[in-house]
Structure formats: structure tokens, C-alpha cells
Image (spheres, rainbow, N blue to C red):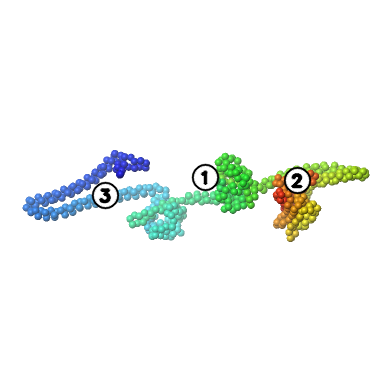
Amino acid sequence: MSKPSGLTRDASTVRPAAPRRYRRILRHIVSRAAARWILIGALGALLVLLVGLIAVQGLRTGFSAMQLLAATLFVLPIAGALIGLLWYGRTLGGAVAGRTRAEAAAHASGESFRTVASTMADGIITIDDRSRIQYVNEAAERMFGYTRDELIGNELTMIMPESFRDRLQAGIQRYLTTGKRKLSWESLELPGHQKDGKEFPLEISIGEHTLGDEHVLTGVVRDITDRKRAEETLAESEAKFRRLVASAPDGIFVVNTQGGILDVNPAGEALIGRDRGQIVGHKLAEFIPEERVSVMDRYLTDRLAGHRTTELYDETWRGVGGHKINVQLTSQVVHPPEEKPYLVVSVRNVTNLQEMQRKLLESERWASMGRLASFVAHEINTPLTNISLLTASISRRVSDAEVQERLKKITIQGRIAASITQELLKFSRPGAINPVETNLTDLVRTAVDQSDMFRKPGVVVETDLGKEPVVCTLDPLRIHEVFVNLIKNAYEATPNGRVKIRLEDRGPLVAITVSDTGTGIPPDVQRRLFEAFFTTKKKGEGTGLGLAISRNFVATHGGDITVSSEVGRGSTFTVLLPKQAPSPRRGP
């Protein structure tokens, strides 16, 4: 069913047209219909009038019926031609009026276009199919520095750099000939050429239309100098920021709300021991020990939500080779406009720093203990000396066998006490080292031979001292004592099994390892092995100073002693020494 003619539709509903519009439409329809029927009626009346005049004139002059018919037939074509002429004249008049109205509308449209174009900030340029400029607006004149008269009729290439003109002309002609183009015509960036010779960046969008048989291209041109300058400034700022991030000593990780890594700097790659491609796109949790993942997830969630105010955060990560490292984190939440927030996490490896702090505290503690040990040793030495002298004096005067036996025991215990005081003095005042050029290979071999008295029958000794002798500058007495102490401890920890002593040349360093297949050392004991007076031996079997003194001796040479052990599988002690010991100095 068709809709009533009196209804018009807008975006949301259908409503009746206004009564005034009804009257206007009705008058238009009636006026056009009345004009048509008036013309037809007038032409019909004229035809009847002509036939009637012929008939009256014929009767008055005495024409016969045949003559009247002939006259009528003669007049009818003339009347038809007259009617057709009148109808064509009206139609032609309507066409002329329509064309006049169209021309007026076109003129009005052109004026509207020129009015709008003259107020636009962007330039407008129209060219014909021979690349000649047909129209420019005021903005284009200002943009290129030419007047309209200088531009109209000239080729478009006059406002393009000379180096670009041939390519531009070839591209336009190719399109006009084949209809194909290599580039999009929307937001095309090209260089422009001003009258004073200055080049500047343009953004051009091109449209096309036809005027009769002529193909016309119209471009909207925008000077993007300021935008390009801003882009260059931004790019330079970003490049500077990236250089700073790339050169930062701390690892920097950009993390999204799901804990995924978006970016990482070279220090971050070195921290984890992986290339950028093996880090970006992975979860941060992959580089954290399993037992710390939930804690780290909580930290990230709280920081992104703004609940956590403390930025400095100590954590444990997996470093190169999967080894655990101690790190400190600082982070900053970034809220980009219309995007999800992300977290910039700065990670510093503080493992070495904390180890240095531990050693410093340990050194201070040892210094305090050394002062105490020195005091105790001096205070004990005097009564021990007196006891020894009195025992010897009594032994010379008394012949009783039982008394002599007891005096011998006193003497033995006095010697033990004296050896302890010597150990205390050695620990508290290692003294200056006397480095000399020493064949370290022979020194290790001698220590192995002298320690053999402590080896149990079921223990097998293996040595790997290399084919070439290793020569170092060190204090042979101190280092020999270190080797004997380590080998003796290995024998005591291995009732049955194997002890291996190995010497390895590592360029500027040498490594001496003493390994055993004994009982092993629990982790909690390993942490205290080098503490003064700490011992796992039975009461009376050791002072707990052997390893502490050994580490002191090695430290005075600029080296270190480390231990690795597994309960039930044995232990390995490694002595690292520089080939060239420091200049003679007092020990710590």
C-alpha cells in the first residue's frame, strides 16, 4: 500500500506535512494543469473557428460541398502546423527557462564554492588534463607566494621542486591515460616549492571530476611544516630517551597489566642472560623463582592499582644461567591517554653489593674478634708459661711415678693451650705477607704429601696438577698452611671414598680445588663455615679457627675461598688466587 502524499519522513518518525505546504503543492499542480488545458482548448477553438470561417465563406460564395471539403483539408495541415509551432514554442520556452535556471543555479553554486574556498585555511588547486592550473584559492596564493594571475594557466610543476617535477608530470599523465596510480590520493605527502625557492612539506588529497569532455583534478593542499617540525622534535626526544634507556646501568622492563613484557633495555638483557627477542612477549614471572612469583604478581597488581606507595622493593630473580640473584626494584606507573596503563620497572642487581656489604660486616666482626682473641692470648700466655715452668720444676724434684705421670698430662694440656693461643694470635694478627716467586705446582704437591698422615686407609687420593708447572708470586708458608688445612679437613670428612686435589690455570688466576666424597655439609652449616670459633668437630678436637685463618691468609693475597656441598655426596673447596699477589701489607 502506497504512503499518503502528505507524509514526510525524518530520522525518527513520520508526521503530516504542514497545511501551508499542502496549499503550495496544490497551487503548483493546478497552475501547471490549467496552463496545459488552456493551451489545448485555445488551439481546438482556433481550429473550429477556421473550419467555421471556411464553411461560412463557402456558403456565401456558393461553393459546393466538395469544394468546402477540399478547402477544409487544405486548412487543416496549416492549422496543425500552427498548433505544433505553438506547442514547440512553449516547450522551447520551457527548456530555455530551465537552462536559464540551471545556469543561475550553477552560477550560485560556483559563487558558494568560491566563498567557501576563500575562507579555507587549506589551499585548493584545480588543474586540467594537461596539468595547467585552472583555479587557486587565497590560501594557496599565500602558501606558495604567487598571485592568482601568476598561477592560472601555468603548469602545476611550477610549485613543485625541480627534482620532483618529471615524476609528478609522469604520474598524472599515466593516470589520465591508463586510470592507474601507484599511490593513494588521500593524505599524500609531497614537497612544495615557493616563489622564493624555499621547499616545504605538503599534505595533498586529490579528487577528480569532469566538466563536459574535460578531465579536472582538484587538490586540497596543507602546509605541514609545523607538524613535521613537531614530529621531528618528538622523534628526537624519543631517540634521546631510548639512548638514555639503552645506556642505563639498570635493567628496565616495560610491563603491561597482565605481567607481559613489552620492552627491555640492553642492561635488562644482560641481567637475565637472554636476547631481547627471548624476553619481549614473555611473562615477567618466567624470570622469577617459582616461590616468589605470587609475591611479585601481588607487587605488580598493587602498583598498577595505586595501592602500593613504597617504590623500592627487594626481590629475588633468575639471572644468567638461571642462578638466583638479589635485585632491587623501582617502578613507575604510566597512564597514556585512551590506553591501558603500564609499568616501567627498573631492576638493579645488588647481589655483588650485598656480598660486599656482608664481607665488610664480616671483616668488622673479625676485627673485633681478633682484638678480643689477641687480648685473651696475651692474658693466657703468661699463666701458661708459669704453669709450664712450675711443672718442669716439680718434675725435677719429685720422683714418684704417679706424680710424674700427672705432671706429664699437665704439660701436654699446657702445650695444647699454648697452641690455641698461637692460633688466636695468628687469627688476630696474620702479619705481613712475604710474596716470592713460587712454583705453585710443587707447593700443592708438598702439601698433599705432608697431609698424608691424616688420611684413613679407606681413602683414595687423586691429583690433577696439570702438565706444566704454574708459577705465582705469593707467600709460600701461608698458602702451604691453607692447603694442608683443607686437605686434612677432607680426609677427616671422608671415612671411605675419594679425595681429589686439582690445580687449574685460569690466566690471571689459579684455582686449587679440594673435593671429597664424604658426608657433605648442610646448607645452614655452610653459611657459618668460615666464622671464627665455629666447628662441627667434637669438643677438644678443634678450635674452629682453621678455615677462618685460611680465608684470612687467602684474602691477604687478594683471593678467596668458596665451598659447594651436598649432604651425602661430598664437598668441594675452591681456592682462587691471583698469580701476582699484592704488595706486602698487613692482613685484615
**Marks 3 and 1: which is nearer the front?**
1
Q: Residue at x 27, y 40 (%)?
A: 23
Q: Which residue is mark 3?
A: 97
Query: How far apart are the two marked residues, 3 and 1, measured between alpha carbons?
Result: 64 Å
**Marks 1 and 2: which is nearer the front?**
2
Q: Secondary structure at mark 1?
A: loop
Q: Secondary structure at mark 3?
A: helix
Along the polypeptide, which appears first: circle 1 or circle 2? Answer: 1
**Marks 3 and 2: which is nearer the front?**
2
Q: Which residue is mark 1?
A: 340
Q: Position of residue 49 (x, y in %)?
A: 14, 49
Quarter of the view holding residue 540: top right
Q: Which residue is mark 2?
A: 536
Q: Is residue 322 left or right of residue 135?
A: right
Closest to the observer, 516 or 505: 516
Amino acid type of disc 3?
A: Ala
Along the polypeptide, which appears first: circle 3 or circle 1? Answer: 3
Quarter of the view holding residue 391: top right
Q: Is residue 284 left or right of residue 56?
A: right
Q: Secondary structure at mark 2?
A: loop
- In the image, residue 365 above or below residue 270: above
Amino acid type of disc 1?
A: Lys
Amino acid type of disc 2?
A: Thr
Circle 1/circle 2 CB separation < 8 Å: no
Seen from this angle, which residue lies furthest left? 62
Count neighbours of disc 3 (C-alpha within 10 A) and say few if under 14, some if 14 to 19, many if 20 or more.
few
Q: Position of residue 179 (x, y in %)?
A: 39, 58
Q: Position of residue 175 (x, y in %)?
A: 40, 58
Along the polypeptide, which appears first: circle 3 or circle 2? Answer: 3
Q: Residue at x 40, y 48 (%)?
A: 120
Q: Which quarter shows the N terminus?
A: top left
Query: How far apart are the two marked residues, 3 and 2, measured between alpha carbons?
Result: 122 Å
